[in-house]
Image (cartoon, rainbow, N blue to C red):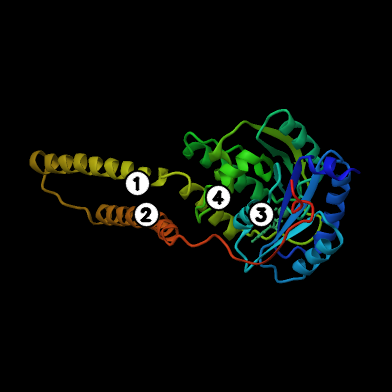
């Protein structure tokens, strides 16, 4: 094909965070290249971000880079977590549209056709919304559902859509906006929603993992949920205020009642059990909210250090994106 004509085609960058994914990368690569072949109107590149894998992930990616001009790699200096791995991918993506997808094929690559259609129709962010969660336990489904309910209640103006993962296409301008948010505590679902821009959901069925194991256990998911809430809203601090006001007011009424009782009824002063209950209950509430304060304080501590988000130990651009525009 004519070289000049080739260069004027829009560039699609597909960002793939990968942490110990040696078992699935080969299949992923095959499916993604097959999809690229179905998109002759675009220049396509895959940017693998190796998030400090301890298996052969980087070696496999290097192999792809060598034999395929469409493959790029970013090799992080250690495991930073998926949120930062995605950010590193966005930083290195120069596409007119950037797609982020899991390496485990839980997100069917074929959906990218629909993403592109909606992007062409004018949407900046096209995200995939799960209708089913095959291969996930009822406990994961139940906790995920509870999480979305809480987020919905507390997140105020910025609505985080339900059952939406990271799998999405973003236009150049929405990626540029996202990249300006450099906070350390990156709850990407929140950041995606925060930047705004016209968005569109595409429904899909989330497949079970093609191979390998999930990297998220319940403790990680719990921390992820905490991160989501604390990096997004100060509602827990407000709850502390209101509980404080409420208990102080109740204590005042209770005091009045005790004074009245002592003056007008009898002088009986039983009260050890109720005293214990009150002391322990209030002590518990106080400790709990000191913990909540601590969550915020810890995050402020993290942000004030202003460290770079990640370091790379190697970057290999795709030969498609590095040619002049
Ligand atoms: N991942 C990553 N860094 C991590 C954990 C996960 O880059 O510290 C990647 C992982 O390789 C995969 C994606 O994030 O491409 C989603 O991970 P996983 O499938 O384990 O999560 P789940 O689908 O079970 O939520
Ligand atoms: Mg997965």
> What's the residue at 70%, 51% (across, down)?
137
Q: Which residue is mark 2?
A: 293
> What's the residue at 50%, 53% (across, down)?
183
Mark 4 or mark 1: which comes first in sequence?
Answer: 4
| Distance of label 4 from label 3 (alpha carbons) | 20 Å
Q: Nearer the viewer, residue 212 or 270?
A: 212
CB under 8 Å between callouts 2 and 1?
yes
Is label 1 in a helix, a strand or a loop? helix
Q: Is residue 66 left or right of residue 289?
A: right
Give the label, 2 or 1, closer to the camera.
2
Where the C terminus falls, by quadrant? Answer: top right
Q: Quadrant of residue 54?
A: bottom right
Q: Which residue is mark 3?
A: 92
Residue 234 lies, in percent from the top left, at: 41, 45
Give the label, 3 or 2, closer to the camera.
3
Q: Nearer the viewer, residue 104 or 125?
A: 125
Q: Which mark is residue 271?
A: none
Q: Is residue 33 left or right of residue 74?
A: right
> What's the residue at 36%, 53% (across, down)?
289
Q: Nearer the viewer, residue 256 or 106?
A: 106
| Distance of label 3 from label 1 (alpha carbons) | 42 Å
């Amino acid at each position: 094909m004519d070289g000049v004509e080739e260069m004027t085609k829009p560039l699609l960058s597909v960002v793939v965070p990968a942490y110990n994914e040696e078992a699935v990368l080969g299949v992923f690569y095959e499916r993604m290249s097959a999809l690229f072949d179905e998109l002759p109107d675009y220049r396509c590149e895959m940017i693998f971000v190796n998030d400090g894998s301890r298996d052969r992930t980087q070696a496999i990616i290097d192999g792809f880079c060598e034999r395929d001009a469409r493959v790029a790699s970013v090799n992080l200096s250690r495991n930073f977590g998926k949120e930062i791995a995605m950010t590193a991918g966005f930083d290195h993506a120069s596409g007119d549209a950037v797609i982020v997808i899991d390496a485990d094929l839980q997100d069917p690559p074929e959906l990218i056709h629909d993403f592109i259609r909606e992007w062409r129709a004018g949407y900046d962010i096209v995200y995939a919304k799960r209708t089913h969660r095959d291969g996930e336990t009822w406990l994961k489904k139940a906790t995920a559902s509870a999480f979305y309910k809480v987020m919905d209640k507390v997140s105020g103006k910025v609505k985080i859509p339900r059952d939406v993962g990271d799998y999405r296409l973003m236009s150049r301008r929405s990626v540029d906006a996202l990249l300006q948010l450099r906070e350390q505590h990156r709850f990407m679902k929140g950041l995606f929603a925060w930047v705004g821009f016209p968005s569109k959901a595409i429904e899909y069925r989330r497949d079970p993992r093609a191979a390998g194991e999930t990297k998220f256990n319940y403790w990680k998911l719990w921390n992820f949920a905490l991160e989501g809430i604390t990096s997004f809203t100060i509602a827990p601090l407000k709850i502390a205020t209101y509980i404080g006001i409420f208990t102080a007011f109740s204590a005042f009424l209770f005091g009045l009642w005790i004074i009245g009782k002592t003056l007008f009824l009898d002088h009986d002063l039983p009260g050890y059990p109720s005293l214990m209950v009150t002391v322990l209950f209030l002590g518990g509430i106080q400790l709990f909210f000191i913990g909540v304060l601590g969550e915020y304080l810890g995050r402020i501590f993290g942000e004030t250090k202003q460290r770079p988000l990640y370091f790379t130990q190697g970057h290999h651009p795709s030969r498609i994106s590095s040619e002049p525009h």
